[in-house]
Image (cartoon, rainbow, N blue to C red):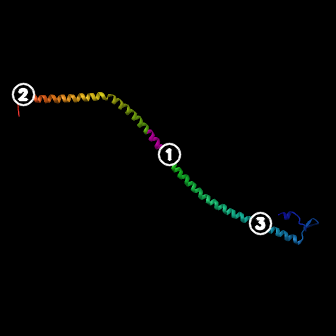
Amino acid sequence: MWAFCCLDAHEHIDQGAVVSDPFSARRETDVLANMLAADSTRIDVLVDSVGVVKGDVRLMRGEIVHVAQGVDELRGALTILTRHSVAMENIVTSLTDIRGGHSKLDERVHTIERAMPQLLEARVMAMRAVIAVVGLVLAAIVGLVLKTGVHP
């Protein structure tokens, strides 16, 4: 483009008009043709670059879809994890209640164990009473047998 704004070495000014020699016009045409060829090459490179960018954008769309699917899967997994967390909290609460009940049972067992000697003594006395009653019944039977005089 600078060829239009600058005078060539073979040009000269005649009464306010620029007159060029015939070789100068040819050179201007060659310069313009070279500039157009360079611009055409640049445009071709840009078109190729745009094609590459379009391809990259298509690939990125596919990757974005995969990322979105992954996010959906993570959302589902997080929902399940939250449910499990709530279930675990419920289990911990239940275990705490069970431990409280266990400690109450421990207290009751200790109370019963302290009273156990009396229970054992009562059992021994009940057994002695049963044996005494059975002994008295046997003695009464023997007394009746002796009194009636039945001898084999």
Q: Amino acid at mark 3?
A: Ala
Q: Amino acid at mark 2?
A: Lys
Q: Secondary structure at mark 3?
A: helix
Q: Nearer the viewer, mark 2 or mark 3?
A: 2
Q: Where is residue 88 drawn, in percent x and y?
A: 46, 43
In the image, is 26 to the left or to the right of 150? right
Q: Earlier in the sequence, mark 2 or mark 3?
A: 3
Q: Image quadrant of residue 11?
A: bottom right
Q: Secondary structure at mark 2?
A: helix
Residue on which disc 2 sits: 147
Q: Nearer the viewer, mark 2 or mark 1?
A: 2
User: Mark 3 touching mark 1, by CB under 8 A?
Assistant: no
Residue in front for this viewpoint, 112 or 45: 112
Crowd tier of the residue under label 1, counting other residues whose Cα lies within 10 Å: few below 14, some 14–19, many 20 or above: few
User: Mark 2 touching mark 3, by CB under 8 A?
Assistant: no
At a point 38% along the width and 33% down the height, the residue shown is 106
Q: Where is residue 114 drawn, in percent x and y?
A: 34, 28
Q: Which mark is residue 38?
A: 3
In the image, is 46 to the left or to the right of 61? right
Q: Gap between marks 3 and 1, in whole Å?
A: 64 Å
> Which quadrant is the N terminus positioned in?
bottom right
In the image, is 70 to the left or to the right of 148? right
Q: Earlier in the sequence, mark 3 or mark 1?
A: 3
- What segment is highlighted magenta in the picture? 84-93
Q: Where is residue 6 drawn, in percent x and y?
A: 87, 63
Q: Where is residue 146 drawn, in percent x and y?
A: 7, 29
Residue on which disc 1 sits: 82
